[in-house]
């Protein structure tokens, strides 16, 4: 497990305790954003610890936890270090300096790493071994196993290894971000001279070497470590230990000075490889000599060092999850076609346009199929000779995206295609550059976003000629146009041909692709133009004893919004918040937030939808869209929220929120002291299971109705 670094670790732990104590005081109106995010990842880790879950699902959550923590250090910790290096004592909206926050993060992250190692070494790995999935160390293998691994090493591993010595003629090598490495100390037996060498574990090779039985896994770095005599012939190997470096990976574009955003992003991606180091993970058995050398060469301090008793980079457990062992996973869920979209016309042809003309359609993924709703809309439009144009925003999409293929096909059919590809979508920049170039080559009008703003909205517009009249079909959603994540992320979307919404989307795309200062949209709430003030106005309308607010989102950070919710609570409004990740609002504080509850649902699917409900039954206003309530979403991104006005669809949204509020299996609640606690299971309500059941019930009702008619 991660080990404390004597006085430095004690100081960090004391700092975290002080910060927690300050956070528990009633005069502290906002919880710390960074610690709140770590609390969220702790809830993910709790799923890996949950022995009631299938074993490979627990392995998956451990991999997700590891990936999440990597990203946190690459972006959030890196940002705080930049602020500290720039001499900023207090960051905007924070009551603590960057240095104080980094100390608190250190303490909390170290505890999480301890838990991660414990669950893998003491719980998950032994349980998997009982089912034939064994994590084996080299010294646990027999002679036949070792003979097999020698052959694997010589044929598949040795040819791609490159040992890099450090001596007067060879400077310390660059250590790439998130790479797994071996630190080797070798000694020349003739001269007695000792040298350090770095050996990078090739990232293209599997994290674990799979034995011939397909069920035993040996860490790749151990296989390499046992063959160092081939890499350093004639030298004595004194020590070998694994280490891993995390670097600043956030883009820092000077967009105002960039003539070509595509070129600027490509250049910044190359620079990202050389970002400043922010974390060093090492094997617990590493020597003090090597530790000091790595810290010095990477320009890191003791607080940046994490010693781990167990394998580094447990994100490699995705390879274990991919094993064909369905009995150790959740029962597969096959999304159903939204009942209204399951009909065909008399000729058996597609009717998605006629269905939308008959009334708006609400789709809820992954319970409703993404393929037979959103993808079908774009694919049908690409093939329909009556369609004149397709306009769409692309923030993140899958590598084999049917939607991008459909847009390319639409270009080939002579339709006007406009694609707003957000090049600055973090960690998807390279993929988006590739899609942008492919679309451009096909003849699409590709726009890379607005200077200074990320285009995060999820919108599509299909323009179709019908009997000499142009009609616009719209999709506004909460999730990306990504067929892979649509099976894993919970999102909602609205399919509509409402003329006012269509005009709004037309003007929004004009804003994104051309020059427009329009701010008075008919139905859409658009950031950074109107969304903040519109949300504040809706909260203000509920700031009374009869007020009612229910909001579901990923993160709640914005202090102006939080203060408005505090004011509504003090006026007597009833407020329920469902926040999957970061929440800086402190609920149930007497005199401040008595009437506010905050809960988080963490489970099989990643809760990703944003649903904002205001008012009671007769005067309800509901919105769905792309925006969380964070300063970046409200002020520095192009976001949209669309109203849902059909009473039947409002009831369905309310039903989703009600199930989230009733959940006592996956739910956590936030207390006034800033501590999250698991909700005690009484009725056994599981949001994800219940929504699957409702999707099947809707399908059965539609089938029964069809049989009756």
Image: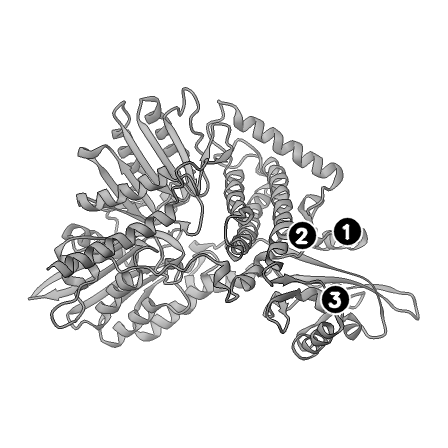
Residue 522 makes an appearance in the image: no
Q: Position of residue 25 (x, y in %)?
A: 52, 23
Q: Which mark is residue 225?
A: 3
> Residue 492: image x %, image y %?
30, 51
Distance Cα–Cα, label 2 vs label 1 = 11 Å
Residue depth check, mark 2 versus mark 3: number of the one nearer the observer: 3
Q: Which residue is mark 1?
A: 292
Instruction: Say which residue appears at 89% left-offset and 65% top-offset.
Output: 193
x, y percentage for residue 160? Answer: 66, 75
In this orientation, which residue lies closer to the viewer: 55 or 624?
55
Q: Position of residue 259 (x, y in %)?
A: 42, 61
Answer few, some or many: residues within 10 Å of disc 2's Cα (few below 14, many 20 plus, some between 14 and 19): many
Element type at marker 3? Answer: helix
Q: Cα distance, mark 2 to mark 3?
A: 20 Å
Residue 424 picture quarter: bottom left
| Residue that extends furthest to the top in the rendered view of this protein | 591
Mark found first going from the N terminus, 3 or 1? 3
User: Label 1 near label 3: C-beta < 8 Å?
Assistant: no
Tell me the distance, in whole angstroms, between the alpha carbons under discs 3 and 1. Answer: 21 Å
Give the mark nearer the N terminus: 2 vs 1. 2
Q: Quadrant of residue 318?
A: bottom right
């Amino acid at each position: 497990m991660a080990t404390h670094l004597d006085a430095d670790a004690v100081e960090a732990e004391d700092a975290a305790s002080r910060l927690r104590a300050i956070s528990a005081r009633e005069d502290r109106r906002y919880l710390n954003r960074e610690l709140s995010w770590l609390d969220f990842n702790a809830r993910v880790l709790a799923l890996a610890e949950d022995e009631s879950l299938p074993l490979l699902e627990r392995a998956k959550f451990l991999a997700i936890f590891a990936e999440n923590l990597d990203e946190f250090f690459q972006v959030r910790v890196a940002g705080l270090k930049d602020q500290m290096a720039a001499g900023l004592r207090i960051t905007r909206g924070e009551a603590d300096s960057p240095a104080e926050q980094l100390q608190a993060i250190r303490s909390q992250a170290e505890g999480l790493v301890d838990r991660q190692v414990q669950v893998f070494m003491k719980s998950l790995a032994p349980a998997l071994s009982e089912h034939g999935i064994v994590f084996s160390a080299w010294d646990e293998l027999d002679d036949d196993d070792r003979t097999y691994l020698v052959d694997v090493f010589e044929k598949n591993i040795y040819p791609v290894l490159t040992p890099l010595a450090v001596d007067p003629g060879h400077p310390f090598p660059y250590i790439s971000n998130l790479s797994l490495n071996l630190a080797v100390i070798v000694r020349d037996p003739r001269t007695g001279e000792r040298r350090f060498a770095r050996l990078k574990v090739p990232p293209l090779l599997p994290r674990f070497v799979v034995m011939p039985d397909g069920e035993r896994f040996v860490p790749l770095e151990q296989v390499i470590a046992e063959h160092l005599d081939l890499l350093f012939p004639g030298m004595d190997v004194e020590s070998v230990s694994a280490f891993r470096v995390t670097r600043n990976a956030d883009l820092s574009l000077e967009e105002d000075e960039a003539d070509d955003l595509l070129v600027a992003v490509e250049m910044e991606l190359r620079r990202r490889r050389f970002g400043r180091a922010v974390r060093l993970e090492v094997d617990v058995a590493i020597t003090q000599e090597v530790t000091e050398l790595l810290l010095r060469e990477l320009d890191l301090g003791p607080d940046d060092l994490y010693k781990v008793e167990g394998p580094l980079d447990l994100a490699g457990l995705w390879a274990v999850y991919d094993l064909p062992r369905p009995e150790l996973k959740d029962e597969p869920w096959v999304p159903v076609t939204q009942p209204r979209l399951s009909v065909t016309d008399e000729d058996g042809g597609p009717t998605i346009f006629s269905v939308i003309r008959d009334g708006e359609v609400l789709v809820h993924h992954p319970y409703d199929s993404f393929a037979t709703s959103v993808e079908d809309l774009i694919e049908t439009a690409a093939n329909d000779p009556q369609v004149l144009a397709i306009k769409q925003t692309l923030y993140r999409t899958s590598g084999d995206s049917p939607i991008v293929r459909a847009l390319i096909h639409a270009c080939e059919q002579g339709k006007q295609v406009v694609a707003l590809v957000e090049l600055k979508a973090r960690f998807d920049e390279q993929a988006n550059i590739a899609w942008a170039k492919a679309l451009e080559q096909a003849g699409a009008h590709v726009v890379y976003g607005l200077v200074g703003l990320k285009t995060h909205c999820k919108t599509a517009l299909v323009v179709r000629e019908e009997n000499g009249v142009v009609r616009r079909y719209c999709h506004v959603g909460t999730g990306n146009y990504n067929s892979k994540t649509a099976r894993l992320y919970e999102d909602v979307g609205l399919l509509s041909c409402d003329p006012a919404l269509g005009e709004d989307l037309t003007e929004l795309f004009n804003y994104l692709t051309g020059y427009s200062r329009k701010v008075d949209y008919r139905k859409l709430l658009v950031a950074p133009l109107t969304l903040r003030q519109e949300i504040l106005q809706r909260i203000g309308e509920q700031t009374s004893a009869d007020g009612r607010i229910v909001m579901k989102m990923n993160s709640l950070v914005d202090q102006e919004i939080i203060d408005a919710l505090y004011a509504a609570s003090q006026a007597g409004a009833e407020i329920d918040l469902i926040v999957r990740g970061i929440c800086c609002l402190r609920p149930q504080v007497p005199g401040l937030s008595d009437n506010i509850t905050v809960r988080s649902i963490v489970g099989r699917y990643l809760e990703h939808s944003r649903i904002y409900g205001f008012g009671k039954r007769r005067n309800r206003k509901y919105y769905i869209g792309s925006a969380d309530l964070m300063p970046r979403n409200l002020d520095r991104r192009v976001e949209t929220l669309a109203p849902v006005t059909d009473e039947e669809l409002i009831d369905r949204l309310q039903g989703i929120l009600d199930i989230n509020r009733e959940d006592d299996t996956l739910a956590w609640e936030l207390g006034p002291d800033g501590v999250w606690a698991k909700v005690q299971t009484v009725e056994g309500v599981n949001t994800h299971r219940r929504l699957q059941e409702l999707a099947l019930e809707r399908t059965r009702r539609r089938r029964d109705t069809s049989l009756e008619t």
